[in-house]
Amino acid sequence: MSELKARLTRSAQEALKYWNLDVAALELISRSENVVFKVTAKDGQAYALRIHRPGYNTREELQAELIWTDALNASGIATPAHVRTRNGEGYAKVSLEGSPHTHAVGMIEWVPGMLLYERIRTASDSEVDSFFHKLGALIARLHDQTERWQPPAGFTRRVWDANGLVGLDPLWGKFWEAPVLKSEESTLLFEVRAQLHKTLTDLEQNPETFGLIHADLHPRNVMIDGESLQAIDFDDCGFGWHYYDIAVAFNEFTGHPRTNALQESLLKGYRSVRPLAHAEVALPAFFMVRPLVSLGWISARPELASSKDIRPRIAPIIAAAERYLAG
């Protein structure tokens, strides 16, 4: 076991003291935005213990995530159920060895099945079309719920509006200042940022197109078990345009050989549940926004990817930006 893994495991063991669980096994699953452990109890029940990255979500924002996912479950849209501590709290606090920060720690029930992304990789064309149709319908059901639901007083989440996405100090970082960019690339991305900011600023915000969204519902954050899809990882949820959820869902497949067919399946699935007004006008902007904000996210986390890993992603982003500016 590496020293880092050993330190993370000791912190997870310390956090588990806040829950009434008879633990049989503890396994490190991922280290990305959050550190995630799979916890298996002696009765066979499995859970995900999430050690949250400090400085991203406040305690109030984490509590809002719990409130919304509880409301989704109550409405019949299955999400990972939160497990309260022995004192009835949604989250505990723990210190990581070598870190000056205190980390919030939460626990959710383990979701059975496999990631939709992995299932897509081995699926036939017709199956992939079906998966994207179902994903579009799932996103629409989430938007339906949030349009009907009234969050309680004090409900606080980030806002994925024009400033949050492509403002001068966006939520996921100044993508045009990514260290991997050449000078002319940085200039181009700053120019497209300005155009996108104007487009989004002029875009209407109403309950039909703007509300509480998942904001990271791509196929790596969707579990498939049998025929059903389930959204996971609500860490980035906030208030934003519905178009952004659709752009996020499709972003990794933009260069797919069947791009148009998959996009059509996603939109048909969405529209089988609720209308999507002005999509033809708005979606191109959000398809441009998503790779930009993703570049900002990964550039701010050098522990997750080196410049050598990021550089291959730049050429498609630059090409898309040139096309977008050309109209």
Image: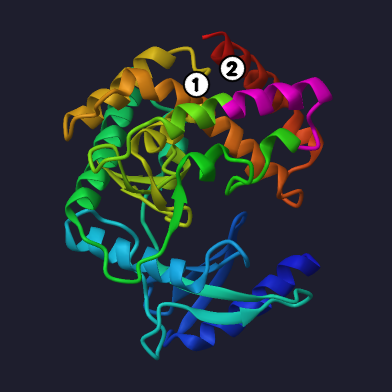
Magenta-tinted stretch: 178-194
Q: At label 2, which amino acid type do we have?
A: Ala
- Return the residue nearer the eye: 310 or 293: 293
x and y percent of residue 67 in the render? 32, 68
**Is residue 150 visible to the viewer in this orientation of the structure?**
yes
CA gap, disc 1 and disc 2? 10 Å
Element type at mark 2: helix
Assess whether mark 2 and mark 1 are in contact (beta carbons under 8 angstroms). yes
In the picture of the structure, the residue carrying the numbered disc 1 is 254
- Image location of residue 277, percent across then percent down: 24, 26
Corner quadrant of residue 32:
bottom right
**Residue farthest along the top direction in this orientation:** 326
- Regarding residue 124, the answer to whether it shows in the image is no
Residue 85 colored in magenta in the image: no
Q: Residue at x 26, y 56 (%)?
A: 78
**Residue 129 drawn at (x, y percent):** 31, 22
Badge number at residue 150? none
268 or 317, nearer to the observer:
317
